[in-house]
Image (cartoon, grey):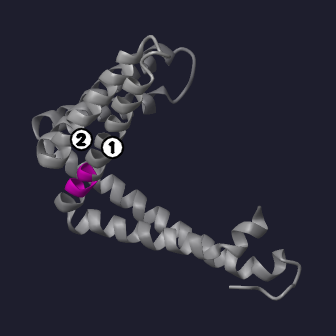
Amino acid sequence: MLQQYAENWWAFLLRGIVGIIFGLMLLLEPLRAGLAIIFVLGVFALLDGAVAVVGSVINRKEFPNWWVILLQGVVGIFFGLIAIFNPVIAGLAILWVIAAWAIVIGILGVVAGIALRKEIEGEVWLILFSIFLILFGVLTFLNPIQGGGIILSVWAFLALLSGIMSILLAFKLRGMKNQVSGGKPATA
C-alpha cells in the first residue's frame, strides 16, 4: 500500500491544495461558501430523493414497505428544492438542528459528568465542554448568523489543517517513491 501511495503522491498534494483553497474561501467569503455548501447539499438531496422515488415506485410489488422509501424520496426532493431555491431558509434549518443537537448533547454531557464524579478524575472537562456546547446551542438559536460563522470558522480551520498535512504527506511520499519501488527509476 505504501508503494501505491508513494506512486500517487500527487493526489495528496492536490487534496491538500483543494483543502487550503476551501479553508481560505470559508475564512474570506463565509457567506458565499456557506451558501455554496447548502446549494451542493440541495442538489444531492434532490437527486437522492428522485432516485428514491423512482426506485420505490418501480419496486413497489417486491417491497411491501415501498411507501417508506417513497416518503424519504419526497422529503429529499422537498429539502433539495428549498436548499436550491432558498438556501438561507435551508441554512437556518440546518443551524437550528445543529443548535438543538448541541444543547441536548451538552445537557446529557453535564449529567454524565456529574454521574461520573465518583468514578473518574477529570470529569470537570466533560462538564465544561458540555456547558460550552449548551452555550453554543443557545447562541446559535438566538443569533444563527453568529452560530453559523463559528461553524464555518471551525470548518475553515480543519480544512486548512487537513490541507497542510496532506501537502506535507505528499512531499514525504514523493521523497520515498524511489525507496519504496526498490530503487527502480520512478515514473511520473
As rendered, which of 82 and 172 lies closer to the eye? 82
Answer yes or no: do the residues labelled 2 and 1 have beta carbons within 8 Å?
Answer: yes
Compared with residue 100, is residue 145 higher up or lower down, i.e. above or below?
Answer: below
The quadrant of the picture occupied by the N terminus is: bottom right
Q: Which residues, given as a range, are shown in magenta?
A: 34-39
Residue count near mark 2 (Cα–Cα under 10 Å), binned few <14, some 14–19, many ≥20: many
Identify the residue position indicated by label 2 in the image.
80
What is the chief secondary structure element of the magenta stretch? helix
Whether residue 43 is visible here, answered yes or no, is yes
Classify residue 107 by image quadrant: top left
Disc 2 or 1, which lies upstream in sequence? 1
As rendered, which of 121 and 152 lies closer to the eye? 152
- Depth check, mark 2 against mark 1: the one in front is 1
x and y percent of residue 167 in the render? Answer: 54, 73
In the image, taking residue 107 as reference, residue 123 lies left or right, namely right
* In the image, farthest residue toward the bottom: 185
Q: Please tell me whether mark 2 sits on a helix, a strand or a loop.
A: helix
Whether residue 106 is visible here, answered yes or no, is no
Q: Residue at x 80, y 82 (%)?
A: 178
As rendered, which of 135 and 151 lies closer to the eye? 151
Q: Which kind of residue does numbered mark 2 sit on?
A: Gly
x and y percent of residue 28 in the render? Answer: 23, 69
Residue count near mark 1 (Cα–Cα under 10 Å), binned few <14, some 14–19, many ≥20: some
As rendered, which of 90 and 124 lies closer to the eye? 90
In the image, taking residue 9 as reference, residue 26 lies left or right, namely left
Identify the residue position indicated by label 1 in the image.
47
In the image, taking residue 148 as reference, residue 128 lies left or right, namely right
Q: Please tell me whether mark 1 sits on a helix, a strand or a loop.
A: helix
* In the image, farthest residue toward the top: 64
